Amino acid sequence: MESSSVKFLVIGSGIAGLNFALSASKYGNVLLITKKRLIDSATAKAQGGIAAVLDPNDSFASHIKDTLVAGHFKNKKSAVEYLVKNAPRAIARLESLGMKFDKKARREGGHSFFRVAHAGDNTGAIVEKTLIKAVSKNPDIEIREHTKAIKIIKKNGQAIGIIAHDEQKNCTYEIRAKAVILATGGIGQKFKNTTNPKISEGDGIDMASSAGASLKDMQYIQFHPTVLFAPKKPRFLLTETLRGEGAKIINENHEQFLKKYHPLAELAPRDIICNAMWKEEKKGHHFFLDFTHKDSKKTKKDFPYIYKNLKKYGFDLTKDSIPIAPAQHYLCGGIAVDLSGRTSIPGLYAYGETARTGVHGANRLASNSLLEGLVFTMDIPKELR
Ligand code: FAD
Ligand code: SIN
């Protein structure tokens, strides 16, 4: 295959890559490549939703404080403020593309308010489909599926393109671009137990690091406490919004032990819950998520995706306590970027989970990740306009 040249080369078709492609298409031609199908992304697996201050009784100050507290104040404050203050605009953008959120917001761990905008209990799939629809009908965006970026090409210290591999034609070729955009997602597949899909292999971070880009906060790996843990079953996530609606974490003796560790108990930030579970595990305990005290009709209506999948794996959310354990979920660090997504290499930009903007600090607040992928890709860096 021959080499090609574009203004924007976007690598990845999750929320960050798709939304960047839409924003960039106003300023030049975009080529978006993705290593599997467009839909294959962590974004499409997201359950809980997108955090945003949309209720007049809530406030930016509260969302900012919750983000900083969850992040143990290791966050970059200017990035947190930018994230939170642009959240309503990001939600409005999705709505303008046809996304419909449920009327009542939900709550997740670490949030002082019901501020998680959601569409049922598989919000990510609907966000992903909404963005794919918009990108697919945009004449200035070319899409190449099954095309994997394998190396960044540099000239005089600047990123000028990549080497790509077409997995169906089994050929390797160069793509030159004015701006190379990494939106390749997380690193979950580097762990034995993860909620992440197969595509989350850390490719963008590996390529950027090999090209000499700075990485930051790579030690801040987030684990999610409520992941299905049963022999021969996948590590299926049980959304934190279940706890927002009253789900309990109990041990084999039906003891709700989290109150010993944090006054918010089930609604404490994730790292605190995971640490509590590890301490209890050392004492020989194991854990279950229990939602059986809730009205079963309402459970099936409010959490149809979780209910259906658990049934497939042999559990009934309305009748059984579900065996759980923490699993790797998210990388808070990544490729160091400024508020416009610029990396330390001119011409190379990074967005979404692969980037480290500083918004998450040492531990991400629930539902701030889809938000980050949206907010930081709404405005294109000045030099690229
Ligand atoms: P992704 O959505 O992972 O997309 C990465 C893309 O890059 C994919 O298309 C992939 O195929 C492509 N790619 C990777 N490497 C290459 C390569 N070498 N060449 C070409 N293409 C490549 N966050 C929230 O805020 N709210 C939630 O409710 C929520 N729930 C979650 C539930 C689950 C089960 C999981 C796993 C995560 C959840 N998260 C949630 C986190 C959030 O979904 C992710 O952090 C976010 O979707 C990342 O978006 P992204 O665009 O950066 O990456
Ligand atoms: C969940 O729904 O529990 C995941 C939310 C997130 O990762 O922010």
Image (tube, rainbow, N blue to C red):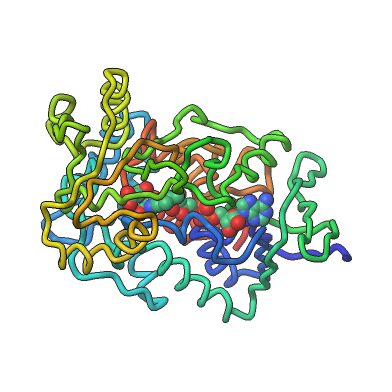
Apparent side of residue 10 relative to residue 108 in the rendered image (left or right): right
Can residue 368 be seen here? The reply is no
Can residue 33 be seen here? The reply is yes
At x 52%, y 41%, the residue is: 188
At x 76%, y 53%, the residue is: 161
At x 68%, y 71%, the residue is: 29
Q: Position of residue 201 (x, y in %)?
A: 60, 44
> Residue 156: which quarter of the image?
top right
Q: Quadrant of the C terminus?
A: bottom right
Above or below for 373 versus 211: below
Q: Position of residue 138 (x, y in %)?
A: 58, 79
Apparent side of residue 87 relative to residue 264 in the rendered image (left or right): right
Apparent side of residue 202 relative to residue 101 in the rendered image (left or right): right
Q: Position of residue 343 (x, y in %)?
A: 60, 42
Q: Position of residue 59 (x, y in %)?
A: 18, 51
> Residue 316: which quarter of the image?
bottom left
Above or below for 291 versus 67: below
Q: How many marks?
A: 0
Apparent side of residue 325 relative to residue 27 in the rendered image (left or right): left
Q: Quadrant of the N terminus?
A: bottom right
Q: Among all residues in the image, which is located at the extreme top?
A: 283
Q: Nearer the viewer, residue 335 or 260?
A: 260
Q: Nearer the viewer, residue 64 or 203?
A: 203
Q: Nearer the viewer, residue 251 or 303?
A: 251
At x 30%, y 54%, the residue is: 315
